[in-house]
Image (cartoon, rainbow, N blue to C red):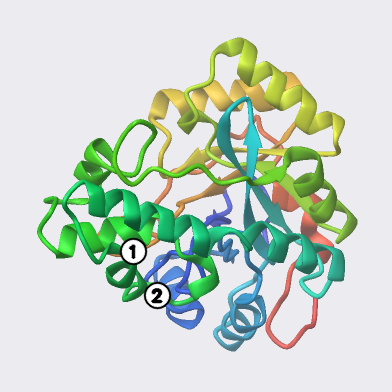
Amino acid sequence: MNLDAALNADLHCHSVVSDGTLTPEALAERAKAGGVQLWSLTDHDEIGGQARAIAAAAAIGLPYLTGTEISVSFAGRVVHIVGLGFDHEAQELIDGLKATRGGREPRAREMAASLAKAGIPGAFEGALQYVGNPDLISRTHFARFLVDAGHCADVPEVFRRFLTEGKPGFVPHKWAALKDAVGWITRAGGIAVIAHPGRYGFTPTEEYALITEFIGHGGRGIEVVTGSHTAAEFQQYADTAIEFGLLASRGSDFHCPEESRIDLGALPPLANRLTPVWQALQERVHHAGVAG
């Protein structure tokens, strides 16, 4: 397998194990059909779908890297850290993710109570209809309920009117610390990557603080080409990767055929001047018939 920057790698997507709508098996098939040459399933705060993803990818000859996306609290915002190429049976990682997920149901019930006060009853039960894994009920599931119940026309409208800070349905959650998330990934043999950095709205000073602290804890990568970045941000974060000596990653952040901005395999390639994260993970790739 050619592991240069032009590789059609998709190292960020979600299944029903977190807040996606497709199974790991269906995602593997979709990735293969979309021309993906190296795939990773990165469910939120969960690695319960990894064995299925490994098996599904192997069955169709699709090289695979283990993955997850961990929510952390930083500078008053939620930041996501993708982990790639780790041992998915590492107990410290399993336990850390379980602890991070632990507060989701009580938070969801508070979200539903807030929506009820705003005139939308039954939101907890409504959101549960869209949950593949009850431990991972999230704002996305509430958003799907609000759209299908006719309260909003689409998911972007949901997040303009509800579920964000200062709006009905918003309840903060105590996420993992950046140090812990990076540590769980690296001690399990993987590489930690800052996911979609353009999404957080940080000032240059805040972003510099995030990146330097991330590197200080052992983080090594940053997403450059991702579904939520603009073409200008592809260039901006390519420059950032080079400035800080970070490995570059690429992933669609695909959740659902009807909702996602870009499909698996449809992103432009990384710039040739970057060092792809997959070059540092060659020994961690699962191939058909190989344990990896």
Q: Residue furthest right?
A: 187
The residue at which mark 2 appears reads as 22
Residue ID at (67%, 27%): 241
Q: Is residue 184 left or right of residue 162?
A: right
SS for callout 1: loop
* Quadrant (top left, top right, bottom left, bottom right) of the C terminus: bottom right
Label 1 or label 2, whichever comes before in sequence order: 2
Q: Are marks 1 and 2 in contact (CB under 8 Å)?
A: yes
Kindly indicate the quadrant of the structure image that contains residue 139. bottom left
Residue 52: image location, x then y, percent:
60, 83
Kindly indicate the quadrant of the structure image that contains residue 205. top right
Q: Three-letter amino acid code at disc 1?
A: Cys
SS for callout 2: loop
Residue ID at (45%, 44%): 171
48 or 60, which is in the foreground?
A: 48
The residue at which mark 1 appears reads as 256
- Give me the C-alpha separation between circle 1 and circle 2: 7 Å
Question: Which disc number belongs to residue 241?
Answer: none
